[in-house]
Amino acid sequence: MLSLLAAEGIGDPPPFTAFADQWQLTPEDWHQRKGRDLLARASTRLPSDEIPGLFAHLLVFPLASSAGFAAGWLRLWNSAYYLREVLEFGSFDAVVNDYSDRSDASSLLLLLGCMGLGCFDQAVSRLGKDDQVEAGELVSLHRILTSAAMEISQLDDTLNRDRWQTILQHLALRRIYGDERVASTSRAAVFAPGDETLIQAYMQYFQADPGDLIAFLHACMSNGFDAAMLRDELQGAAIDLQACVANLQRLNKLNDRRYPLRADALQAIEPLMPVVTRPERSVPARMPAGQGTT
């Protein structure tokens, strides 16, 4: 409630430290009162279909409203280290409830990811208006969030995999939206073209599943991003978009539920199709590694 009132400009945001302390769990804490209380309190705020979601925005508002928000979210993520262990291996005392245990940890980590995305959005809205917010810190937070999402994708590819992919799609879209080549006079730019994480790295990562790449490019076109810039980025990433579409069409014939094919998406990305010429030297994808969050 205090966060909600502060978000409306009524009073000051509550201190974030008390909230952050709740996530500092040990193996002994997880099945004891501290861990169960955290799960119970968070259960009504876990993300649904909307990402990042209203509750994630409200929970992170005190952090996003303060200086040092990037380091603050990183401390929060690192304090939840044991949850990542539970996600990967289960807890030592889970016994027969291993799947439920891993699912609970996955949901809590997803909430943290959504909070990080909400923190980035709120801080971006203050850029150029608040001297506590600098583009460099936003670039740092963006890298940290990408690294965290990549870490989870390496730990587990089943529980909430689609939602973490959605978070990565959101981060990639924000990377383009905040690029100085796209930013208008009405808003401050966050990224220079060569800043981490490179747009080309996201494209190469999504290329592993042609459906993910086409969904991302469809979202880019739906947001009105410059087609010429996107073509340049695709060419710099050595991506043959026509070959990706053909690959998705073949996969769709084998399993249309796993590899859906949307006519509106194919139509939207047609302006990007003349990208078959490969550069002399391919640019390797350098998505931040999972361990880079520590």
Image (cartoon, rainbow, N blue to C red):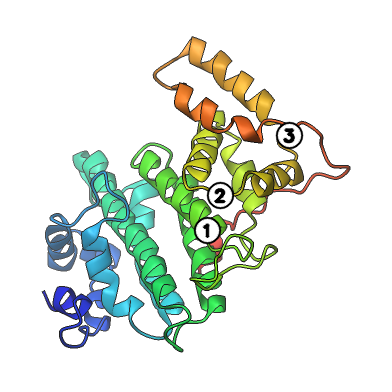
Q: Could you say which quadrant of the image residue 72 lies in? A: bottom left
Mark found first going from the N terminus, 2 or 3: 2
Residue drawn at the location 23% of the way across and 72% of the way down: 22
Circle 2 or circle 3, nearest the eye: 2
Mark found first going from the N terminus, 2 or 1: 1
Task: State the image coordinates of residue 237 (x, y, percent, origin top left).
Answer: 72, 44
Residue drawn at the location 67% of the way across and 49% of the way down: 229
Circle 2 or circle 1, nearest the eye: 2
Q: Amino acid at mark 3?
A: Val
Task: State the image coordinates of residue 109 (x, y, percent, origin top left).
Answer: 33, 56
Question: Vertical placement of 75 versus 89: above or below?
Answer: below
Pointer 3 residue: 275
The answer to the question of whether label 2 and label 1 lie on touching residues, with beta carbons closer than 8 A, is: yes
Residue drawn at the location 73% of the way across and 34% of the way down: 275
Q: Amino acid at mark 2?
A: Phe
Pointer 1 residue: 177
Give the alpha-carbon distance from disc 2 to disc 1, as whole Å. Answer: 8 Å
Graded by Cα atoms within 10 Å as few (under 14), some (14 to 19) or many (20 or more), the crowding at tag 3 reads: some
**Across the whole image, how many numbered discs are drawn on residues?**
3
Checking the image for residue 225, the label placed there is 2
Question: Vertical placement of 74 versus 211: above or below?
Answer: below
Asked whether the viewer can see residue 262, the reply is: no
Graded by Cα atoms within 10 Å as few (under 14), some (14 to 19) or many (20 or more), the crowding at tag 2 reads: some
Q: Could you say which quadrant of the image residue 289 lies in? A: bottom right
Q: Secondary structure at mark 3?
A: loop
Tell which of 118 and 78 is nearer to you.
118
Q: Amino acid at mark 1?
A: Tyr
The answer to the question of whether label 1 and label 3 lie on touching residues, with beta carbons closer than 8 A, is: no
Give the alpha-carbon distance from disc 2 to disc 3, as whole Å. Answer: 17 Å
Mark found first going from the N terminus, 1 or 3: 1
